[in-house]
């Protein structure tokens, strides 16, 4: 009676190892809902990769609040991707030596080093994404601050690049030149922590900047890169025949024609029916959005649930833990207890069960 993520374990684990092999110095990203797997499970799997000899020394989390869930399941360093701010809640002080802070503002650099002089830090340089990071001048000023300290534990520079397609190497080159010009005092080889470079770009970057150690931060490609190893299913909880005009549901809607109502597991508490803006800009994508809006206006909304390979319509908006589907007359009617396929956005879905073979 659950929304279940079923994983072909051997295939998934083989994929994880292939990605780790192809990306020396990989930094697995475990944040948010753990890409549907949960943070704890991903932390254990990162440890598994490390124990099998892969070059995995650091695990990245999204926020400081996520540290406790991974720290007991992973014994390496923990990089926090969200930049440190003075209002960050304190974490377990016994983890201080393992945590690497991202610093994106000069004011925060001063405050963090005042509060924790031996804190391990990565300086973030702003990119064309314009989310977090220092300008070239701020980076230069940060270098001045750090050169005045003997106890600094600088771990490198971070770049968070946009997902938009196109070659990022020109931008990365300019930003790395800014970092080199800042002459920040690193403890070892200069290190670049970077997101969203292609494999080809990473290889070219290593050739063009051989003095730098490239540390690719990878989440989706690692955990969700082989969708064929993953299957999401829901349980059919109830089946009711309806005739045209019959009322049903919270809002007493009426059936548009004869058929069946299916009550299936999965609702808003799981993320079913909740969508984030996609940002798609193509004409085709906009047309699809317009079409969905038109269906919504007349009460017919396509659900993520599929029966016999065809997506079925919501009979009404999803409930908290279950959803109602409308199945027109003539379609095969599954029995109570049957499982049907669900297409979900893994980063926005909470599963009742995750079964890994």
Image (tube, rainbow, N blue to C red):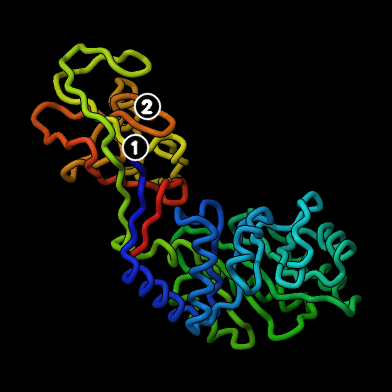
* Left or right: 58 in relation to 301: right
What residue appears at the point 87 percent right and 69 percent down from the top-left corner? 117
- Marks 2 and 1: which is nearer the front? 1
Q: CA distance from mark 2 to mark 1?
A: 13 Å
Q: Image quadrant for the C terminus? A: bottom left
Residue closest to the eye, 290 or 150: 150
N-terminal label among 2 and 1:
1
- Report x, y in % for residue 142: 82, 68
* Left or right: 302 in relation to 82: left
Q: Residue furthest left?
A: 330
Q: Quadrant of residue 211?
A: bottom right
What residue appears at the point 59 percent right and 88 percent down from the top-left corner? 210
Residue closest to the eye, 335 or 340: 335
- Report x, y in % for residue 63: 65, 55
Q: Secondary structure at mark 1?
A: strand
Q: Which residue is mark 1?
A: 265
Q: Is residue 254 above or below residue 77?
A: above
Q: Are marks 2 and 1 in contact (CB under 8 Å)?
A: no
Q: Secondary structure at mark 2?
A: loop
Q: Is residue 36 above or below residue 338?
A: below
Q: Which residue is mark 2?
A: 317
What residue appears at the point 33 percent right and 40 percent down from the top-left corner? 1
């Amino acid at each position: 009676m659950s929304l279940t993520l079923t994983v072909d374990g051997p295939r998934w684990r083989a994929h994880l190892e292939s990605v780790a092999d192809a990306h020396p110095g990989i930094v697995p990203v475990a944040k948010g809902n753990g890409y549907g797997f949960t943070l704890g499970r991903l932390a254990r799997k990162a440890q598994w990769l490390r124990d099998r000899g892969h070059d995995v020394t650091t695990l990245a989390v999204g926020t400081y609040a996520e540290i406790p869930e991974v720290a007991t399941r992973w014994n390496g360093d923990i990089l926090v991707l969200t930049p440190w701010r003075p209002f960050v809640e304190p974490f377990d002080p016994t983890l201080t030596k393992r945590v690497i802070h991202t610093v994106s503002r000069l004011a925060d650099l001063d405050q963090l080093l005042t509060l924790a002089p031996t804190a391990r830090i990565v300086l973030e340089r702003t990119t064309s994404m314009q989310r977090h990071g220092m300008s070239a001048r701020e980076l230069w000023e940060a270098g001045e601050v750090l050169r005045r300290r003997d106890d600094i534990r600088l771990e490198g520079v971070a770049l968070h690049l946009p997902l938009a397609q196109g070659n990022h190497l020109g931008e990365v080159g300019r930003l790395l030149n800014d970092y080199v010009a800042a002459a920040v005092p690193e403890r070892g080889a200069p290190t670049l922590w970077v997101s969203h470079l292609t494999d080809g770009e990473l290889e070219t970057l290593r050739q063009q900047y051989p003095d730098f150690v490239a540390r690719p931060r990878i989440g989706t490609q690692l955990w969700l890169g082989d969708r064929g190893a993953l299957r999401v299913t829901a349980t059919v909880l109830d089946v009711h025949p309806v005739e045209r005009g019959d009322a049903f549901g919270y809002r007493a809607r009426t059936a548009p024609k004869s058929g069946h109502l299916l009550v299936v597991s999965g609702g808003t508490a799981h993320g079913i029916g909740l969508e984030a803006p996609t940002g798609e800009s193509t004409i085709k994508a906009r047309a699809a959005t317009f079409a969905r809006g038109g269906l919504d206006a007349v009460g017919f909304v396509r659900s993520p649930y599929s029966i016999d390979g065809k997506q079925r319509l919501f009979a009404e908006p999803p409930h908290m833990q279950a959803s109602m589907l409308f199945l027109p007359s003539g379609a095969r009617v599954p029995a109570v207890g049957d499982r049907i396929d669900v297409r979900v956005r893994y980063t926005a879905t909470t599963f009742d069960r995750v079964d890994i073979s």
